[in-house]
Image (cartoon, rainbow, N blue to C red):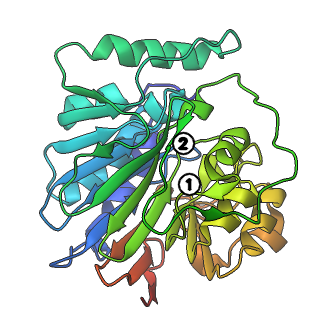
């Protein structure tokens, strides 16, 4: 686990990030859902602003100054002083570890989580400490623990919970409910050892635009959700599960959702396994894969093209983000803050 102490190198990285933010195209459209996928090097941090001006942060990365600085840099440049919602997908340290520090800097109106930590004798000590620290921080704060079928309060957008605490939605969403031909003949074994399987999975509906985000949901839970019938239907954008690791990202999920675009919140040496890269590339209708980092694991043949990589291998100035601006007609633009490369995806 990275140290919580601030080094000269981390200050330099944060300064580089601030400079990048100052020069990048951050202005929000009049009627767009803006999503910033922030680089916390193999954890998860995502900042969202809706047309009404409400803001949400999802997870937050590791409990260190580097990840806090990267979240704060984006929030500060957008003029955010508090978040309306802080959604915690699950309690592993690379997702929940930074939540208390973010809340101290940007207090949240409500903390949304999956409820009690499920009993798990195999839970790694570092993740148990992170979960305990989150619970200890909760008194005096407004908490909303959600179950499948609930909606996360966020204006202009319908954010529906489809998985939570190892449970799945019981009724299909509009457009869902049809048999999923990508389901395996034999479901995988239920393997635990962490809180990943308990992740809050959400489907976001903004007009005709649809996005799915499942935190670090594991394959056996993906199959539980998506088989034999697909309760979700298709999506425009998929936030790829579990940093692109092959413990997640079954064809039943990826091919079943039929995404047009996928974004991976990976690190240079964490995520985008060859198996997952192959599954993504073979998904019907997928146009592009965007990655927060070049992946050493994937290798040169299976990485996304360089223009779709927010952080290159051995880059000196780390912390570049990917921005999505979605419109109600179903169109959206994805922008790479490293090179200002943008691509428009029509309805």
Label 2 – label 1 distance at C-alpha = 7 Å
CA neighbours of label 2 inside 10 A, class few (<14), some (14 to 19), many (20+): many
In the rendered view, tell whether residue 128 sits above or below residue 199: above
Query: Is 43 on the left or on the right of 112, as rendered?
Result: right
CA neighbours of label 1 inside 10 A, class few (<14), some (14 to 19), many (20+): many
Image location of residue 183, percent across then percent down? 77, 57
**Which of 16/278 is in front?**
278
Image location of residue 222, percent across then percent down? 66, 47
Q: Assign a secondary structure to mark 1.
A: loop
Q: Which label's residue is closer to the chain start, 2 or 1?
A: 2
In the rendered view of the protein, which quadrant contains the N terminus?
top right
Query: Is 98 on the left or on the right of 290, as rendered?
Result: left
In the rendered view, tell whether residue 266 sits above or below residue 345: above
Q: Quadrant of residue 36?
A: bottom left
Q: Which residue is mark 1?
A: 265
Q: Are marks 2 and 1 in contact (CB under 8 Å)?
A: yes
In the rendered view, tell whether residue 160 sits above or below residue 148: below
Tell me the residue at 15%/42% (across/down). Answer: 82
Q: Which residue is mark 2?
A: 43
Query: Is 212 on the left or on the right of 79, as rendered?
Result: right
Image location of residue 313, percent across then percent down? 67, 62
Q: Assign a secondary structure to mark 2.
A: loop
Tell me the residue at 19%/44% (across/down). Answer: 83
């Amino acid at each position: 686990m990275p140290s919580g102490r601030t080094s000269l190198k981390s200050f330099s990285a944060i300064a580089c990030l601030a400079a990048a933010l100052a020069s990048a195209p951050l202005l929000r459209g009049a009627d767009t859902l803006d999503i910033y996928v922030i680089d916390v090097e193999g954890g998860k941090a995502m900042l969202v602003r809706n047309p009404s001006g409400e803001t949400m942060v999802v997870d937050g990365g590791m409990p260190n100054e580097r990840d806090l600085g990267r979240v704060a840099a984006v929030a500060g440049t957008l003029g955010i002083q508090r978040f309306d919602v802080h959604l915690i997908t699950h309690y592993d340290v690379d997702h929940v570890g930074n939540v208390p520090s973010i809340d101290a800097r940007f207090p949240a109106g409500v903390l949304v989580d999956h409820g009690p930590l499920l009993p798990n004798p195999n839970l790694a000590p570092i993740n148990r400490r992170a979960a305990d620290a989150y619970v200890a921080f909760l008194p005096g704060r407004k908490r909303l623990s959600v179950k499948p079928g609930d909606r996360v309060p966020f204006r202009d957008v319908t954010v529906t919970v489809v998985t939570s605490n190892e449970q799945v939605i019981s009724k299909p969403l509009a457009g869902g409910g049809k048999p999923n031909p990508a389901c395996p003949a034999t479901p995988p074994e239920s393997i635990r050892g962490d809180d990943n399987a308990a992740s809050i999975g959400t489907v976001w509906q903004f007009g005709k635009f649809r996005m799915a985000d499942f935190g670090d949901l594991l394959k056996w839970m993906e199959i539980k959700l998506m088989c034999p019938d697909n309760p979700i239907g298709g999506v425009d954008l998929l936030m790829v599960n579990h940093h692109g690791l092959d413990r997640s990202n079954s064809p039943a999920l990826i091919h079943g959702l039929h995404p047009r675009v996928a974004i991976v919140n990976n690190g240079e040496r964490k995520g985008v396994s060859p198996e997952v890269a192959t599954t993504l590339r073979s998904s019907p209708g997928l146009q592009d894969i965007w990655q927060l980092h070049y992946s050493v694991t994937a290798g040169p043949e299976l990485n996304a093209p360089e223009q779709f990589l927010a952080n290159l291998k051995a880059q000196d100035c780390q912390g570049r983000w990917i921005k999505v601006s979605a419109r109600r007609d179903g169109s959206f633009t994805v922008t790479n803050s490293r090179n200002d490369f943008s691509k428009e995806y029509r309805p």
